[in-house]
Image (cartoon, rainbow, N blue to C red):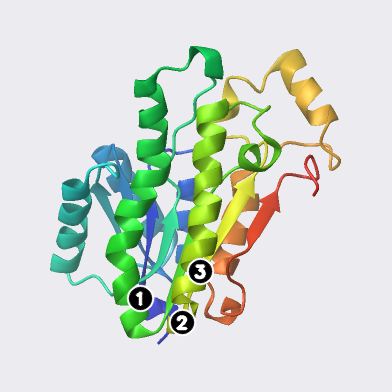
Amino acid sequence: MSVSDLTAVVTGAGSTRGIGRATAHALAAAGWNVAILDLDEASAKDAAHDVSQRSDAQAWGLGCDVTDEASVEAALAVLAGTGTPPVGALVNNAGITSPTPFLEVSGAEWDRIFAVNVRGAYNLTRRVAPGMAERGFGRIVFLSSVSAERGGGVFGGVAYSAAKAAQLGFAKALAREIGASGVTVNSVAPGLIDTDITGGALEGERKDQLVAGIPVGRTGNVSDVADLVTYLCREESGYITGATYDVNGGSHMH
């Protein structure tokens, strides 16, 4: 089964300058058909149009609230109804950050961060993993963060770091459970990447301070992350599972 006979689902890929959209483009360039799920349906459709314009791959854009099981089921049902090839890869990219210090964070904000980053990943993974296992092939990638490894300190506070760390444990345990079915599960932990989320903070003196702590001397690009995710989704990467890949320019080594 070639990746051209399969679909890669990327969540939260609507943002024009985000890791998700760059990943959708990279996967399409590698031959995957791509389904983009985003809370903003117009952005999802725009991203899908953008992908199909730049590659020969089929691309679909759907509105989906990853925190809502019914919304996830509905989006996947629409995909299935369009005759989309089976889902062979899932990139759990949808996420939100929070800089709020722990002594100020409310229960509602804590739950919101976990709802998108952790429950959202569960909602998608729980629905596509059985089909992958049944077909004997699957690639699942979680977009975690260096904040999970070093304990915040960049933009995210405790809630964000805790949620992103939960993804790392989720991925490793799932990799252990379904590896024999031909499904790999890995995590990517980006450091300082120039996206819409970090853009406002990457200016002037603050940017200079942050870059000073990065051995390669620059912030990361979305393509730096997208290329690695695409590599992990290759058929040839079947012996890589339960791993966490750092993409941080050397700012955090362990």
**Mark with earlier residue (1, 3):** 1
Identified at 61% across, 41% down, the residue is: 148
Name the spot of residue 143 as percent of width and height, x first: 52, 49
Which one is in front, 245 or 113?
A: 113
The residue indicated by pointer 2 is 182
Q: Which mark is residue 175?
A: 3
Q: In the rendered structure, which amino acid carries the disc numbered 2?
A: Gly
Q: Which label sits in the foreground, 1 or 3?
A: 3
What is the three-letter code of the residue carrying label 3?
Ala
Q: Which residue is mark 1?
A: 132
How far is mark 2 from mark 1, CA to CA?
A: 8 Å
**From mark 1 to mark 3, how far is it between C-alphas?**
13 Å
Give the SS element for disc 3.
Answer: helix
Residue 120 % position (x, y): 34, 46
Query: Is residue 160 left or right of 41 when viewed as pictured?
Result: right
- Does residue 254 appear to the left or right of 242 in the view shown? right
The front one of 233 and 154 is 154
Mark 2 residue crowding within 10 angstroms, few (<14) / some (14–19) / many (20+): some
Contact between labelled residues 1 and 2, with CB atoms less than 8 Å apart:
yes
Q: Residues within 10 Å of mark 3 (few under 14, many from 20)?
A: many
User: Is tag 2's residue or tag 1's residue first in the polypeptide sequence?
Assistant: 1
**Quadrant that contains the N terminus:** bottom left
Say what amino acid the circle numbered 1 marks: Met
Which type of secondary structure does the marked residue at label 1 adopt? helix
Tag in front: 3 or 2: 3
